Image: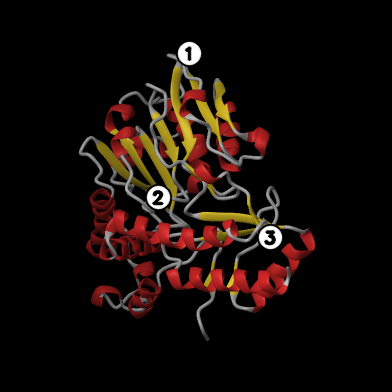
Amino acid sequence: MARAHNFNAGPAALPVEVLEEAQKELVNFNNTGMSVMELSHRSKDYEAVHNEAISLVKDLLNVPDDYEVLLIQGGASLQFSMIPMNFLTNGKTANYILTGAWSEKALKEAKALGETKIGAASKESNYTYIPDRNSIETSSDDAYVHITSNNTIFGTQYHDFDLNTSAPLFADMSSDILSKPIPVDRFSFIYAGAQKNLGPSGVTLVIVKKELLEQSKENIPTLLKYNTHVEKNSLYHTPPTFAIYMLNKVLHWIKDNGGAAGMQIRNKEKAELLYDVIDNSGGFYKGHAQEESRSYMNVTFNLKKEDLNQKFLMEAKQAGFVGLNGHRSVGGCRASIYNAVSVESCKALKDFMIDFQQKNQ
């Protein structure tokens, strides 16, 4: 059976090369006579995979020496709670910049644990843009400023991180981590669920500045302390071994394909293929995001009539395109074009969009 054109928002496409390599090793990893899923997480064979994955993250993102790299379970959603548990101290306020549903959810969890505020938001336009840096309100009592670097539902993305704040900057990068180079030293805390750009679901990457860890609270459950995971090299309890094994494979694939800079070139090419169709459609396709805030990860659009949305999605599915339904908050269509989505799939979708318009003007 031919591979689908997979535009799912997450869990998302994985590189075919990675899947094929994992398939070959599935029942006998590294001549152990066992699958990596059967290995003890205390074994040398697994620890080599684990430590190499952490080393690859540091290499590919140029992580400075004064940061820790952690591999944690619970998804980005658990980080919404762990962050204020560890870093929202009495007398301080957590400052959230709202650019979509996931930043709203992060704020909701922080509200349950301490003082919060909204430093800026684009909700009034149904999140069609990223707030301008000069519109962000910050103050000396901010424990941290939290952003969501890419907004999957609305198709918007930060294209620089020159925010107007001296407070520690935190970022949920679940949907664009390693899709481009990032200035890690601009942040005190970065986190990302793996299931869009880094691998399958089950593991969450955390990059945290050591100086910040020295300020974290102590009177919280052991497993929810970042220092617990630092002290045990993310092996305090049984890690999601297969997810980390796959993370390792995907990181090698990224490295072999030009690293973060190579991904940026590839992702820009893919996004421009689709945005060009939208921009040249004479209003037949209408992008949700304002042009300067458009995402290179999630291309969101509606057709000029709702019945055309439904016809487009039905015919696209029949043609082998998967995952193009837009979220109910925006409606219409969404093409998630994460790292592993091929240029060929995006070219095929471009051709389908042009053909569909010609037949349904």
Q: Mark number for residue 91?
A: 1
Q: Residue 197 at x, y = what percent?
A: 42, 57
Q: Mark number for residue 289?
A: none
**Element assignment for label 1:** loop
Residue sitting at x 68%, y 60%: 284
Sequence-first tag of 1 and 3: 1
Q: Quadrant of residue 29?
A: bottom left
Comparing 53 with 231, the one in front is 53
In the rendered structure, the answer to whether residue 290 lies left or right of residue 33 reads: right
**Element assignment for label 3:** loop
> Which quadrant is home to the C terminus?
bottom right
Comparing 260 with 277, the one in front is 277
> Mark 2 highlights which residue?
177
Vertical arrangement, residue 217 with respect to residue 238, above or below: above
Q: Residue 267 at x, y = what percent?
A: 41, 59
> Mark 3 highlights which residue?
284
Sequence-first tag of 1 and 2: 1
Q: Amino acid at mark 1?
A: Gly
